[in-house]
Image: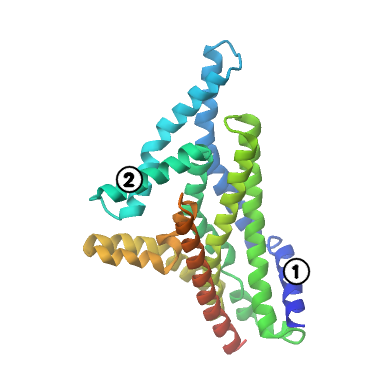
Amino acid sequence: MQLSKSLLIARYSARYSVRGGVGLVFLLLSLTFGLVVANSLLSPVEMLMKEVSASQGGRDNPAFTEMVLEGVLDQAREPVAWLLQERETGDADVDDAAAEAAAAWAEYLLEDRPAVLSAIFMILMLGWPLIVAFGAFDLFAGDISSRQLRYQLLRADRSSIFFGRLFGMLITLTLVLVMLGVTISGYLAIKLPLYDGWDVFSWTANAVLVLAVATLPYVGVCSWISAAIGSSFGSLTVVSIIIGGVPLLAMIARNTYEPAGCISYVLPWGYQLNLLHNETGEVLLAVALCLLQAAFYGWLGYRTFTRRDL
């Protein structure tokens, strides 16, 4: 009975989550962010293809595509390698093994997978948690403040309401990610036929799944803070400070005491890029950490929600 009520609430929450003012702003913000990131990387490639095609009289030739791909890789290789090297080592002083591992990871993303898509989804991975904070901050806070949840408790128990709204938000976020993935991959496949269609589709599907997994702990944090603070504005402020402040605090702390950089592992910031790793073991470990943190923060949210005065 509780499961059926939770699913019913989840369906209702997902259906109506973007119909309010905050929901519409969240949808607009998330789509705008994703499309701006994609456009900033796809536009230069499109211009390069037009220039190469114009220089050859507008004729299609596989050699021209290879030329464009080489240009894309030349532009992307250095920043991607630097980012992954920082991720692998945490500082500028690297040993040969760490540098080699970072180079192999970069080669996997740029050579073995569609490089343009890899760059887009890496940037999305870094910015998406802040979008999640804006979308999920008001899971319970607004209704706790207005006492609206008391009327829902006449028909459903607290557990059903908590998990129903939590699952509904996850469904909404996943659908937004799917829309972004379809739009970006569709544009790349139609307008910029640099890669095989199946490679574009499979890597996009993988990246959307990865982003959905990385979303789980952040939604767990939002559920906890939203249940603890009976104010929408207060919840948004605290959630934003926590999600945005963890990597900033880790960066500052690392400059003072290098091991203190592990603060970033309090949230997936410290390991979420490993979800796109070339080694299966690293990917599985990152997935396990995401699920573990999601369960922990979700439990804190559930404990707070079921014990507080509504």
Q: Amino acid at mark 2?
A: Glu
Q: Is residue 73 left or right of residue 139?
A: left
- Name the residue at 48% across, 22% down: 67
Q: Nearer the viewer, mark 1 or mark 2?
A: 2
- Name the residue at 45% across, 55% down: 274
Q: Amino acid at mark 1?
A: Tyr
**Res 249 visible:** yes
What separation in Å lies between label 1 and label 2 (alpha carbons)? 49 Å
Among the 4 quarters of the image, the one containing residue 301: bottom right
Q: Taking 254 as reference, is 98 above or below it?
A: above
Q: Position of residue 69 (x, y in %)?
A: 49, 28
- In this rendered view, identify the residue nearer to me: 76 or 287: 287
Mark 2: give few (<14), some (14-19) or many (20+) Cα within 10 Å. few
SS for callout 2: helix
For label 2, the residue is: 100
Q: Is residue 308 left or right of residue 269?
A: right
SS for callout 1: helix
Q: Quadrant of the N terminus?
A: bottom right
Q: Taking 82 as reference, is 289 above or below it?
A: below
- Name the residue at 52% across, 47% down: 121
**Res 233 visible:** no
Q: Quadrant of the C terminus?
A: bottom right
Q: Taking 210 as reference, is 168 above or below it?
A: below
- Name the residue at 60% across, 14% down: 58
Mark 1: give few (<14), some (14-19) or many (20+) Cα within 10 Å. some
